[in-house]
Image (spheres, helix red, strand yellow):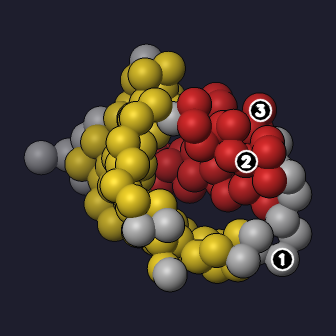
Amino acid sequence: MEKIKVADYEAVLATISKYTEACTEGKSDIMKPAFTDNALMYGYLNGEYYHGSIEALYAAVDAFGSAPETLARVDVLNIEGTAAVVRVTLENWHGLSFTDFHSLIKEDGQWKILAKVFHQYL
């Protein structure tokens, strides 16, 4: 088993920072490079089960716009070779708070988010 390299840890954080920055700036174009083309999203939104394409997230970020009051915390839970799991806590994104679990894959040498599972705090 190979040890985790600091460069991978930093690259995973850089990928996730595109997501958190886009949420704060209200511009999905910032986060799009962080996701695979066929990324999926699952969770409960306003008490209703949601599953589908990450395109819905892009549309929501653009529609809601900037949220400079948003606070984000990122915890890299695990990196194993070409797979990683990250927890992101977003507080006060347009009055909403979430915990996300992002699954990442190292694709052609680049870390990409392939799935987002989230919980919304009501």
What residue is pinned by disc 2? 61
Task: Tell me the tag on residue 69.
Answer: 1
**Which residue is rendered at x = 64% and y = 49% of the image?**
19
Q: Nearer the viewer, mark 1 or mark 2?
A: 2
The span from disc 1 to disc 2 (Cα, nearest Å) is 14 Å
Front residue (pair 8, 48): 48
Front residue (pair 25, 52): 52
Q: Is residue 5 above or below residue 68?
A: above
Q: Nearer the viewer, mark 3 or mark 2?
A: 2
Relative placement, left or right, of 1 versus 20 is left
- Quarter of the image where one finds residue 21: bottom right
The answer to whether residue 115 shows anywhere in this view is no
The residue type indicated by label 1 comes to Glu
Locate residue 96, reporting x and y percent: 64, 74
Front residue (pair 35, 45): 45
Locate residue 70, reporting x and y percent: 76, 73
Q: Going by the picture, which residue comes out furthest to the left? A: 1
Relative placement, left or right, of 37 versus 44 is right
The span from disc 1 to disc 3 (Cα, nearest Å) is 20 Å
